[in-house]
Amino acid sequence: MALIGVDWGSSNLRAYRFGPDGAVVDRRESHRGAARLKRPEFAGVLAETLEDWIEADTLVILAGMVGARAGWHEAAYLPCPANPEDLAGAALRVEDAPVRCYIVPGLSARSANGVANVMRGEETQILGSHIADGTIVLPGTHSKWAQVEGGRITGFTTVMTGEMYALLRNQSLLGQLAEGDATDEGAFALGAQRALDDPAGALPLLFSARAEVLLGSLSPQSVASYLSGLLIGGEVAALRERARDGVMLICSAELAALYRVVLALAGVADVRVLDGADAVAQGLWRIGGLLK
Amino acid sequence: MALIGVDWGSSNLRAYRFGPDGAVVDRRESHRGAARLKRPEFAGVLAETLEDWIEADTLVILAGMVGARAGWHEAAYLPCPANPEDLAGAALRVEDAPVRCYIVPGLSARSANGVANVMRGEETQILGSHIADGTIVLPGTHSKWAQVEGGRITGFTTVMTGEMYALLRNQSLLGQLAEGDATDEGAFALGAQRALDDPAGALPLLFSARAEVLLGSLSPQSVASYLSGLLIGGEVAALRERARDGVMLICSAELAALYRVVLALAGVADVRVLDGADAVAQGLWRIGGLLK
């Protein structure tokens, strides 16, 4: 049986064609993300994208926002703890697809004091890491810190680091004093160190990205890096207890470089990195193998 | 000598005419805030606003964003610690005003580990409280938590609670699931309690304002109150050590009601409230008295 995996997020679609051993033998990408499509358009976009990849016995596994309420079909959040078998078992069969097709559900979690969290797409990346026990961090718009125990995803927390950065950089009074988005490693490290040092975390420090400029102690060109340092520092400061025994980062090389700096400042020595695209492909292959 | 005080912020101008004993005998208000005026317009706006109040021996004291770099004339930030005499001594004489006129400078502060803060306008409100020793909280777009010792403002911290609320409510992915801004006291208290209970503060909780709705455990109509609770709770959680011996709030009655709820949840028993307009008038009178 031929397997195809599709990471279908809000903005983009990334398709992976697997060989019989799970190696990615071909990949295709388009900007026809789930947030840009109306429900009746999904089947056609999938057929156009996969085109000649589709054979009689092909199985297609979809993950990401394609399964959200506003996506193609809603694959309801599965509560943690969940292992690959649970996710495969709850995968939603898509009846109106051009081929045999399933959508991987997202996951939900509640902390000990009842705080809700959801993820959609990251669960597939986490499984793609093949980590049996440990903390997995998926930096991004909404960074996820997930615990994996005995091969099960047991819980996770979200920090809105990427979205907060965009809001503060582009829409806030802090951002008005910022010029450009050039990288200033010193300003980044200063922001990160301050957030790690402050027992109250990053919230009471954010305004300093404005005050330092007004007092002449930070250049407008360095505000973006300083703010990024404060926010990533605040994220790591909030959750560093979970990183004590090391973490695996799943993200792009650019984000991994930033998080490595902050994790090192926080004293986290054991940091491994897995590319986000490799992780999702491996996760799709793994879940697909359970659905064959 | 007749004294007039003007609280000239970014969006509004509020003028207070004082009787010989410091009582406000008349007040005027307009929307001709400092952020809306070009430099050559300030003198005319002041003359039009004060008009028949001006007598031969009138002294006018201005405070707020009128003294910012982009205001009428820049009254440079005075470093903490500062007492009323320091602020009066550093007041900037305005040469092109229609009457004898000074601008009160803003204040700057650096925390023990070097983090910068600035305020402009709040220093006058703090002096208007006539507090000699204690913690003064000025909730708002950029909430200020100031220490006063022996009549001097010795330091302060800023938390961007109001601006964060507006950004998250109106521009973020959380806000997309929110409907309206009605008050839900239960949702507000839940958010505040969660932020107070979480040793990591509010940052890792913000996303729950989205997740709770997606899981059906929070109604879209309650998101605004829950988010407000998380943010004010996060502010108080970050700085509650400073509130141990009580606080004075300087703000509107509406904001005071919200902060009272959160401070009570945080175990702060001694909370006094001073109206923001009364505070600025008293502060202008106090500084003006030193300039006569």
Image: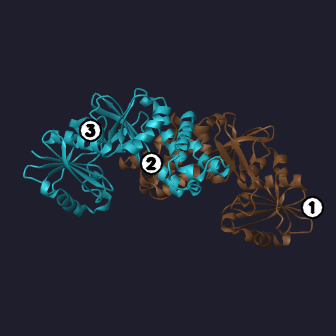
Chain colours: A brown, B cyan
The picture places residue A192, in percent across and down from the top left corner, at 53, 42
Give the number of callouts.
3
* Disc 1 element: loop
Question: Given the image, on which type of amino acid does mark 3 rest?
Answer: Gly
Question: Given the image, on which type of amino acid does mark 2 rest?
Answer: Gly
Given residues B50 and B63, the one toward you in this image is B50
Please name which of the two marks, 3 or 1, marks the residue nearer to the observer. Answer: 3
* Disc 2 element: helix
Question: Is A56 positioned to the left or the right of B267 in the image?
Answer: right
Question: Given the image, on which type of amino acid does mark 1 rest?
Answer: Met
The picture places residue A289, in percent across and down from the top left corner, at 88, 53
Residue beneath the point at 78% across and 48% down = A127
* Disc 3 element: helix
Rendered view: B85 above or below A224:
above
Evaluate whether residue A233 shows in this view.
Answer: no
The picture places residue B217, in percent across and down from the top left corner, at 65, 46
Residue at mark 3: B128
Chain containing the residue with disc 3: B
Q: Give how far apart the Cα atoms at labels 2 and 1 are.
A: 56 Å
Q: Tell me the quadrant of the picture where the C terminus of chain B can be found.
A: top left
Mark 3 neighbour density, 10 Å: few (under 14) some (14–19) many (20 or more)? many
Evaluate whether residue A22 shows in this view.
Answer: yes
Q: Specify the label residue B162 is tagged with.
A: 2
Residue at mark 1: A1
Check chain identity for marks 2 and 1: say if they share one: no
The picture places residue B265, in percent across and down from the top left corner, at 50, 33
Chain containing the residue with disc 2: B
Q: Give how far apart the Cα atoms at labels 3 and 2 are.
A: 23 Å
| Sequence-first disc among 3 and 2 | 3
Q: Give how far apart the Cα atoms at labels 3 and 1 are.
A: 78 Å
